[in-house]
Amino acid sequence: MRSELGGFVVPVRELYAHSRSGVSGSRHALEDHLRGSAALARGFGQVFGAGELAGYLALIHDVGKGTCSWRDKLLHVEGQGGGRVGIPHKHAGTVLADRYTQLAFGAVVFGHHGGLPGMEKLKSELVKALPGGEYAESVGEAIRAVEELIPQIHPEHRLVVPSWLTDLSKKEGRLGLDLLVRMLYSCVVDADFLDTSAHFEATAARVRAPADMAALLERYEMRRAKMLAGRQLSPVDGLRQSVYEQACAASSGPPGVYVLHVPTGGAKTLAAGGFALRHAAAHGKQRVVLAVPYISITEQNAAVYRDLLDPDPGSDEQAVVLEHHSAVDLDAEEASAGLTPKQREELKARAHAAKLAAENWDAPFVVTTTVRLFESLFSHKPSPMRRLHNLAGSVVVLDEVQALPDRLLVPILSGLRGLADHFGVTVLLASATQPSFWELQKWEGLERRAVIEDPSQLFDALARVSYEWRMEEDVTLEGIAAKAAAFPQVLTVVGTTKDAARFHRHLGHHAAEGSLLHLSTRMTGGHRREVIAAVKELLAGGAAVQVVSTSLIEAGVDLDFPRVYRAWAPAESLQQAAGRCNRDGRLPAGTVVIFRPADGHTPRSSEYDAALQASETYFGPGRAFPDDLGALEGYYRLRYHLQQGGPDSGLGAELEDLRRKLDFPAVDRAFQMIDDGLSTPVVVIRHEEDREAIEKAVGQLRDPYRPCGPEVLRSLQQHTASLPRYEADAALRSGLAEPVTGDLLLWCGAYHHQRGLDPDEPEDRQSYAVM
């Protein structure tokens, strides 16, 4: 039997997975793709005891491409210059998964392009593939064609699940199955993407060899000693060394969940890295994943760890530290409301190729954000989930853990416990304001392993500030700006990006002395990094510098001001802001002024309101200061209680029910770490010398026929800022932004040299900001 179309004459047995590579000129043979993907997925799954299952699901994921209609349409599209084939090919592999594993794992195959389906959707689609169904004929044809090339698609026995899953109770078993499906999906999607990229790039699949954690630890210790020797001595250096030594000692303990409770300024970053690397070396962990709440901390911590871990300049060795905070949604199904129909079609055309640019965290030391981490865990889409399997057998450090959103604590704690219990993950919770997670039902019975024996002693020894309260009704942002302007070195932290921009203007109007600097997510990553570096240099030189920032500065950013103003916020934010004051203890005491501006703004959410209410109860004039550990414990208890209608309800318990139902899309919709879920990444060309490189990267992302790897998006991180979705939509409508891929935009409007994408800055065209 032969098939003819448009001049092509192709033997039936020549089955293809993908069109010609622009590099090699060859098509991707289906047998090569399935066997190559299976080998990769098997290796990924072996880390958590499911290698055979992961390999089999990858082996069958594209069996549906074994039909004449798929091959003929592929050749036709290729002859037309490229594009989507558009013929369903998911059902054949889903039938095989149901036959030789169980239906839940069929979701891995069915969703390998579009995302994990819910079980009801999967059941209805399976019916269409069975005898008498809509896809029965093509399913049979595909399986018959592929089994001649790959008889292993019919294993001798049904594949078994890891034994731990069958040992769980029915209720916990459903949650375990949910997590296992997610991990297997990650293995298959990453293997598929890697093998596909290798075809188009005409290279071998890019998978790193396991890191030598002992060698990395040795490098870390050597460079840390050199770094500390080059620093100016501080009165708190002895306490910081004690923290580090306790962290190193605790690292020899068994895998599990650890707590690093250290006051701000206690060198938590170095201690967390030392613990993680030592623990990884001692227990055979494959990587360290450090997650922080703010991009600013990601940028700073990544720079510190690169200095300590990356190879020397000129070395042929690969970089050790991967910094990943790109917020681009490559799986965005709905284009932004500001797009034209033509722009929407262009985005769809490049969608599949763009997904290959997603990060998979294949590096020994990953620095990312908590949003990216838990997005990977609770998404149902391929781009974020492809990296999930690389958490298995790792050390996960949650820095500034107090910033985890209350409304999602139940699924987050459940997921972390599942990773620790079944996937070889050790979790380190690091913060100066440790939440009371063990009082919640999800962590009942879980051993709490303390890194620091007596945190209260450290807090007493590192008390370096005095507090003042400005809570009167007549307090305003401009009034505080007038007072701050009188001091040569001062930091002010406010609640929103708009407040930050307006406070910066107020400082200018009051002729504040020295440099007036601004920090918010409306600035690009590179711009923020430049400002933080400039602030450090000015402070070190004793120069006058006044800074206004959103909360992104108050956790993990190593700055030392003699005076700090903090707009009223939840208690942990107040203490974190105080950590930027007299950080090195060189003054008898720094001054932290907590003020409540009548014209200030705060994030809008019920959990934020509960945190403010609990803060009012414990902290303020006549009550406790923010660094009172006893008051903080009571604060967290009350904060959680205010949001609970029962055991842990109000903290995301409903998501656990969705997980038990294996309703993956519903979990994804309900799990939104950013409350509005509407932050849009925007690439900005700030400097003319960057234009060529940025435009080249944007062009690669826009080209549907030349898929690129994650290094392209990685190169744009430093040039990316964030806008609320409604502003991004308005910018698209007015021509101030253009779509790139997914939800990523290219900015064409004004960019303020200090405030970035300033909502109050007039534009040449019609105003884009809907106020």
Image: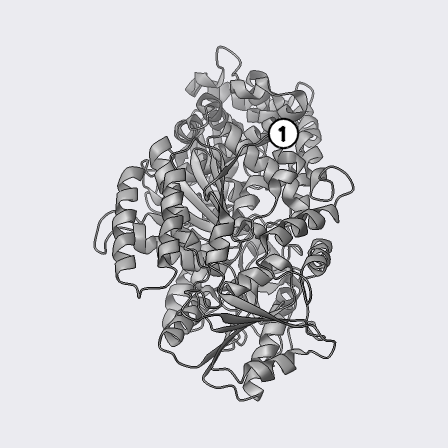
Q: How far from the left and from the top, in percent, is residue 420?
A: 51, 32
- Position of the C terminus by quadrant: bottom right
Most foreground residue, 751 or 63: 751
Most foreground residue, 426 or 672: 426
The residue lying at 63 percent from left, 72 percent from top is 498
Residue 161 seen:
no
Q: How far from the left and from the top, in percent, is residue 237?
A: 36, 58
In the rendered view, tell whether residue 157 sits above or below residue 187: above
The residue lying at 47 percent from left, 53 percent from top is 458
Q: Which residue is tagged 1?
A: 175
The residue lying at 52 percent from left, 77 percent from top is 752
- Does residue 672 appear to the left or right of 266 in the view shown? right
- Does residue 387 appear to the left or right of 760 in the view shown? left
Residue 768 seen:
yes
In the rendered view, tell whether residue 172 sits above or below residue 554: above
Q: How far from the left and from the top, in percent, is residue 758?
A: 58, 75
Q: Amino acid at mark 1?
A: Leu
Most foreground residue, 464 or 736: 464
Most foreground residue, 223 or 361: 223
User: Which quarter of the figure has residue 587?
Assistant: bottom left
Q: How far from the left and from the top, in percent, is residue 438?
A: 61, 38
